Image: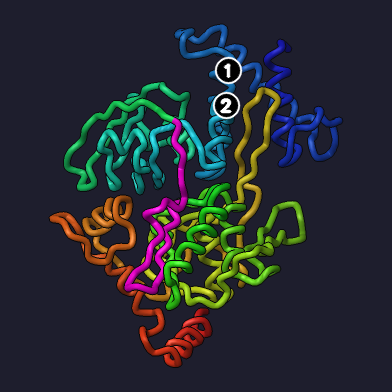
């Protein structure tokens, strides 16, 4: 077998042997019978044959065929697993820390549908080009995306700084389309931008977290200190609407700001381990363990954001207001491969502290406040420019009825004894 076939089998064997850095090719065992390697060898022979005989030589090549084979394999498993070629893996590792080269959007996707833009990062390429939340991406550089999983769509949007791409967008009403040319830039994603932390009604804190990354715990702590210094005393509204998740570790450390040290934040069940992995809150200098908290959610609150919300609710630290969350509770691991790329694969399922499964279920709000679709899209755009405003001025502005409902759950103003009783009632009444 030629060199490529051996390389392919080595990569496949690494994927079959664990969820850490690849080890040397293991000895043949009962766990990896001869048929496993025979089938991998057959696949390598197919790649070799296509590379030599396929009519359009511009569409083949070992790297391209290997990438297609691995992506196709991972795509069959679930919407979140995938293969990241070497260049994409490097870019994605940067994005997982909060910095990436791309166009600056968040999106969600259901099977066989366009990618729906849920948020546009201020100052990013998409924002500069006038791309709006609610628009749908149906082609990226001419490639239809309906059949692609979300992660592969996002991979296509990322790329080297300065490189160009073209999006074909469908309006939120589905009646018109347009093409937009963009140039990728380094996008620094602040998960808690300065305008997303301020006071409402003089003494209620408002904190919008747009995603969770390595910087979120520090940014969140700084925002809480600022709100406390400004006079936050009656309660805090944490806005997780349109938060797609991000780094689970960032969400866990941010949740630690609101929970006693050692509290269970979430657990995870793995296929090959009888023991449940448990993640607990860590000790820190700043704690908001008594201030009443309400969390705003919607259908695009997902993944790490759901873990954060579930942890605070299960520990009676918060109520959820808004709409049911997305329902992404899959634990993803990264397996680096010998070629410099990596597999992103589902290694477990997350559970809230009370044992609730998030995957496919989501979190139902304690106080449901549903919005019709046109209002939702207007509010999505509004949250990017003026978060935490109940009744903003402007022709296209909408009342934030979800925020209004959250404020009603907080203690009454100028009635300290009653406020204390309401605070205790709020915390005890959480499920």
State which tag comes first along the sequence, 2 or 1. Answer: 1
Residue at horizontal 37 percent and vertical 67 percent from the top: 199
Q: Where does the N terminus fall, quadrant-wise?
A: top right
Q: Position of residue 237 (x, y in %)?
A: 42, 68
Asked if residue 78 is among those painted magenta in the image, a careful observer would answer no
Say whether residue 391 is left or right of residue 125: left
Residue at horizontal 60 percent and vertical 58 percent from the top: 252
The front one of 273 and 282 is 282
Check disc 2: other Cα within 10 Å, few if <14, some if 14-19, many if 20+.
many
Q: Which residue is mark 1?
A: 63
Write the start and end of the magenta stretch as one range. Answer: 186-210
Asked if residue 203 is among those painted magenta in the image, a careful observer would answer yes
Q: Check disc 2 and report its element: helix, strand or loop.
A: loop
362 to 110, vertically: above or below? below
415 to 268, vertically: above or below? below
Q: Position of residue 295 (x, y in %)?
A: 44, 68
Residue at horizontal 29 percent and vertical 35 percent from the top: 128
Q: Which residue is mark 2?
A: 85
Q: Position of residue 258 (x, y in %)?
A: 57, 68
Q: Check disc 1 and report its element: helix, strand or loop.
A: helix
Direction left: furthest residue: 395
138 to 111, vertically: above or below? above
Q: Position of residue 21 (x, y in %)?
A: 74, 35
The front one of 226 and 158 is 226
Report the Cα–Cα distance between label 2 and label 1.
9 Å
Direction front: furthest residue: 229
């Amino acid at each position: 077998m030629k060199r490529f076939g051996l390389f392919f089998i080595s990569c496949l064997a690494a994927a079959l042997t664990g969820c850490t850095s690849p080890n040397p090719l293991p000895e043949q065992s009962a766990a990896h019978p001869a048929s496993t390697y025979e089938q991998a060898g057959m696949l390598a022979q197919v790649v070799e044959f296509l590379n030599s005989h396929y009519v359009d030589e511009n569409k083949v090549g070992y790297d391209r065929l290997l990438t297609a084979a691995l992506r196709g394999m991972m795509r069959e498993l679930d919407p979140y697993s995938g293969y990241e070629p070497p260049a994409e893996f490097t870019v994605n590792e940067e994005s997982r820390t909060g910095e990436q080269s791309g166009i600056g959007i968040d999106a969600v996707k259901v099977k066989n549908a366009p990618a729906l833009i849920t948020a546009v990062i201020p100052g990013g390429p998409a924002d500069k080009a006038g791309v709006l939340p609610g628009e749908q991406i149906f082609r990226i550089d001419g490639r239809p995306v309906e059949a692609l999983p979300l992660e592969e769509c996002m991979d296509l949007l990322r790329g080297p700084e300065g490189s160009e791409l073209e999006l074909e967008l469908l309006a939120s009403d589905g009646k018109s389309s347009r093409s937009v040319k963009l140039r990728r830039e380094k996008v620094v994603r602040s998960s808690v931008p300065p305008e997303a932390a301020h006071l409402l009604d003089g003494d209620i804190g408002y904190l919008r977290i747009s995603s969770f990354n390595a910087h979120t715990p520090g940014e969140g702590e700084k925002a809480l200190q600022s709100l406390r210094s400004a006079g936050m005393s009656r309660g805090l509204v944490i806005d997780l609407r349109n938060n797609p998740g991000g780094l689970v570790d960032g969400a866990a450390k941010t949740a630690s700001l609101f929970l006693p040290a050692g509290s269970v934040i979430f657990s995870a069940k793995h296929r090959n381990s009888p023991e449940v992995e448990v993640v607990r809150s860590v000790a820190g200098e700043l704690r908001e363990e008594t201030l009443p908290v309400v969390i705003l959610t919607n259908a695009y609150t997902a993944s790490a954001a759901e873990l954060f919300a579930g942890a605070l609710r299960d520990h009676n630290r918060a109520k959820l207001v808004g709409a049911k969350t997305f329902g992404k509770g899959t634990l993803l691991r990264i397996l680096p491969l010998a070629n410099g790329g990596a597999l992103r694969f589902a290694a477990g399922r997350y559970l809230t502290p009370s044992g609730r499964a998030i995957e496919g279920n989501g979190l139902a709000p304690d106080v449901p406040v549903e919005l019709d679709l046109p209002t939702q899209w207007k509010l999505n755009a509004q949250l990017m420019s003026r978060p935490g405003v109940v009744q903003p001025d402007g022709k296209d502005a909408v009342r934030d009825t979800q925020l209004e409902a959250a404020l009603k759950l907080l203690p009454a103003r100028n009635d300290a004894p009653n406020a204390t009783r309401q605070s205790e009632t709020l915390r005890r009444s959480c499920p």
